[in-house]
Image: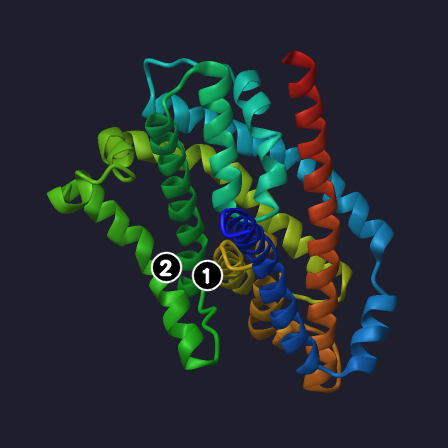
């Protein structure tokens, strides 16, 4: 018994830890969603969800996801070529490695990126460090492109009313300019870091190419959510959409809940409720929450479908 108990206890403890790690993000998402739902009128939320144009939303998002997959693969292909010029990959090869990783991206952005790096290593022999560097360049370009519309929106006078949000939006808008200065200046304490080195090695020109390749993806993402908001009667002017939607996208990427579930809804209600129809603040918040929940659920189902198709194609090849 003394010999067996440590083994049984150790195995049980490991299983409990794995279970806790697996369920913790979902518990966080549930807690945030419960808090957001508690802050709005339940009857108004139920009415907004019942009136949700699901068929139109599904058609819109299906077309958008198809376009976004193509734009994402193109941007990754450009980033891989810039970061790893000695390892040429075709766009088709990038698609084969990227599509299955969308399943992991439902957990968080980092998990999806890790899956992409793993498949690059498994199928093409690209070292993990090099794969991480290419993904780092693509991620940096994505952040730069997200910062640009925020700056444009601020220049157009789209400033949130809350002081904290004003500072957050302004910080994101200034981030692009700061990053450009850093790339030109190349401070050693940044340029020598492994995760940032590919961006600095690519320099301003290479990073600009990677950022330009990411523009269609970000533009498609902005257009999708702007159109989805209009389906729910939320009329957001373009300057306000440019200043606020990228902030929601960035907050959704924080790896504390699966696919930003919960954080996306909380940020959407805070930043977009003022543009929604309704006689009361509760009604406006309920409409935005219905939009955010509907797009999240439909989007997760569509991205999961793309990931499953990619995984099936990968299984056939291997």
Q: Are marks 1 and 2 in contact (CB under 8 Å)?
A: yes
Residue in view at x 43 percent, y 58 percent: 150
On screen, 118 above or below 279? above
Badge 2 marks a residue whose secondary structure is helix
Residue 34: x percent and y percent? 67, 74
Residue 279: x percent and y percent? 75, 86
On screen, residue 302 versus residue 202, left or right, reads right
Look at mark 2 in the image and give the residue it sits on: 173
On screen, residue 218 versus residue 197, left or right, reads right
Badge 1 marks a residue whose secondary structure is helix
Which is nearer the N-term, disc 1 or disc 2? 1
Visible residue check, residue 278: yes
Residue 17: x percent and y percent? 53, 55
Bin the neighbour count of mark 1 within 10 Å (Cα to Cα): few under 14, some 14-19, many 20 and up.
many
Q: Quadrant of residue 33?
A: bottom right
Q: Nearer the viewer, mark 1 or mark 2?
A: 2
The one of 120 and 246 positioned closer to us in this rendering: 120
Mark seen at residue 315: none
Q: Looking at the image, what colour scheme do you see?
A: rainbow
Residue 114: x percent and y percent? 47, 36
Residue in view at x 56 percent, y 65 percent: 263
The one of 35 and 118 positioned closer to us in this rendering: 118
Q: Among all residues in the image, which is located at the extreme bottom?
A: 280
On screen, 275 above or below 139? below
Query: Could you give the CA–CA distance between mark 1 and mark 2, rounded to whole angstroms?
Result: 9 Å
Residue in view at x 64 percent, y 54 percent: 225
Mark seen at residue 153: 1
Residue in view at x 74 percent, y 72 percent: 287
On screen, 259 above or below 30? above
Visible residue check, residue 262: no
Q: Which quadrant of the rendered structure holds the C terminus?
A: top right
């Amino acid at each position: 018994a003394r010999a067996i108990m440590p083994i049984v206890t150790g195995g049980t403890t490991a299983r409990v830890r794995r279970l806790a790690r697996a369920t913790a993000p979902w518990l966080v998402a549930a807690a945030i969603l419960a808090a957001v739902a508690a802050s709005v009128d339940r009857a108004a939320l139920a009415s907004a969800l019942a009136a949700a144009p699901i068929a139109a939303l599904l058609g819109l998002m299906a077309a958008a996801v198809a376009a976004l997959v193509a734009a994402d693969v193109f941007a990754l292909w450009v980033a891989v070529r810039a970061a790893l010029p000695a390892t040429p990959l075709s766009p088709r090869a990038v698609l084969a490695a990227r599509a299955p990783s969308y399943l992991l991206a439902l957990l968080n952005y980092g998990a999806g990126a890790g899956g992409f790096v793993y498949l690059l290593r498994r199928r093409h022999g690209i070292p993990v460090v090099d794969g991480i560097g290419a993904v780092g360049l693509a991620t940096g370009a994505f952040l730069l492109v997200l910062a640009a519309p925020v700056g444009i929106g601020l220049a157009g006078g789209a400033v949130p009313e809350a002081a904290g949000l004003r500072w957050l939006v302004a910080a994101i808008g200034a981030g692009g300019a700061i990053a450009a200065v850093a790339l030109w200046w190349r401070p050693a304490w940044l340029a020598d870091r492994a995760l940032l080195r590919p961006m600095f090695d690519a320099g301003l020109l290479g990073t600009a190419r990677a950022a330009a390749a990411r523009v269609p993806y970000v533009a498609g993402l902005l257009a999708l959510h702007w159109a989805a908001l209009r389906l729910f009667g939320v009329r957001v002017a373009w300057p306000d959409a440019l200043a606020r939607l990228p902030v929601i996208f960035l907050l959704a990427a924080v790896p504390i809940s699966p696919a930003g579930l919960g954080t996306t809804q909380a940020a959407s209600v805070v930043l977009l409720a003022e543009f929604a129809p309704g006689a009361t603040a509760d009604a406006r918040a309920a409409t935005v929450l219905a939009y955010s929940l509907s797009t999240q659920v439909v989007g997760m189902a569509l991205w999961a479908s793309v990931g499953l198709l990619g995984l099936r194609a990968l299984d056939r090849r291997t």
